[in-house]
Amino acid sequence: MMRVTLAMKPMGRWSIPIEAESIVPANFLSGTDLSVWRGNRELGIEEAFSVLVEGDADRAEDVEVVLSGETARLKRIGEYMDAGKITVLGDIGMHCGNFMSGGAIEIQGNADGWLGREMAGGMIICRGNAADYCASGYRGGRKGMTGGSVEVFGRAGDFLAENLAGGTVVVHGDAGDMPGAEMRGGTLIIHGDCTRPAANMKDGACYVYGTARWMLPTFRKVGTAQQDGRTLIRFTGDVANRGKGNLFVGNYEYLD
């Protein structure tokens, strides 16, 4: 088992985030001769981090990368990650887990926008809050997350799981506006409240255990269902798009 600890060095007057798509477990099998970018300046990894490597490994599955310090300024951590584990001891910047297909990322703080963007497999756990576009597709794209799981223990921002096509997304708190918009598969579970869920969904299942505010009128109520010991109201739709999705809500309110 190999454990790579990366402690960010103080950035001083620098406010430009660090683009760190090279930080994935597989890359450390060949050593620590890696680069990151601060704006248009390329930095060796040891210029930006204090690096400690313990143990060794022959497979990415046996590599854990631990990040500490001002990690909220790190972007694209775990991009295209396919094995191993990344543990973030604080917050993390935008695009964490982009296109991830395997392995696990655990964030002990909050996550900025686009967490798990277009993820295909693996697991992301965020112990804090996640900002807008968590588990979504990129702007203009037609498919978002296709596999794996994202679990947020705090709240999530707007456009959660937009274009969700597969996998499971769970938010233990509230979500913002338009979660599950354009869903075409997969499962979205929101334990709290949200606004305008599952707009234009085509397929998949969206569960809102709290209140769905500004409920869209283009869903057809078909009865009730049991989920996790709760009785939820079941809708199908979005009929405006001839959708065959299922939306389950604890309560709902239409826009006055």
Image (spheres, helix red, strand yellow):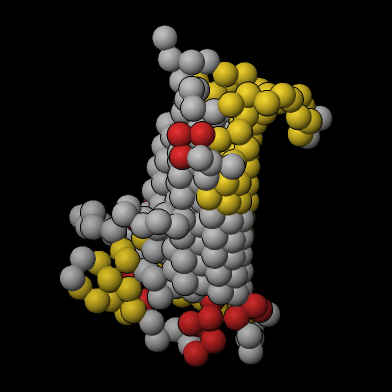
Q: How far from the left and from the top, in percent, is residue 221?
A: 63, 24
Tell me: 36 left or right of 250.
left
Residue toward you, 13 or 248: 248
Q: How far from the left and from the top, in percent, is residue 201?
A: 50, 41
Tell me: 19 left or right of 92.
left
Residue 120 placement: quadrant: bottom right
Residue at the spot 60% in from the left edge and 81% down from the top edge: 60
Residue toward you, 163 or 100: 163
Residue at the spot 46% in from the left edge and 56% down from the top edge: 144
Above or below, 183 against 212 in this view is: below
Q: How far from the left and from the top, in percent, is residue 256?
A: 42, 9
Residue at the spot 52% in from the left edge and 15% down from the top edge: 253
Residue toward you, 171 or 19: 171
Q: Is residue 127 visible?
A: no
Residue at the spot 51% in from the left edge and 72% down from the top edge: 81
Residue toward you, 243 or 168: 243
Q: How far from the left and from the top, in percent, is residue 152?
A: 57, 44
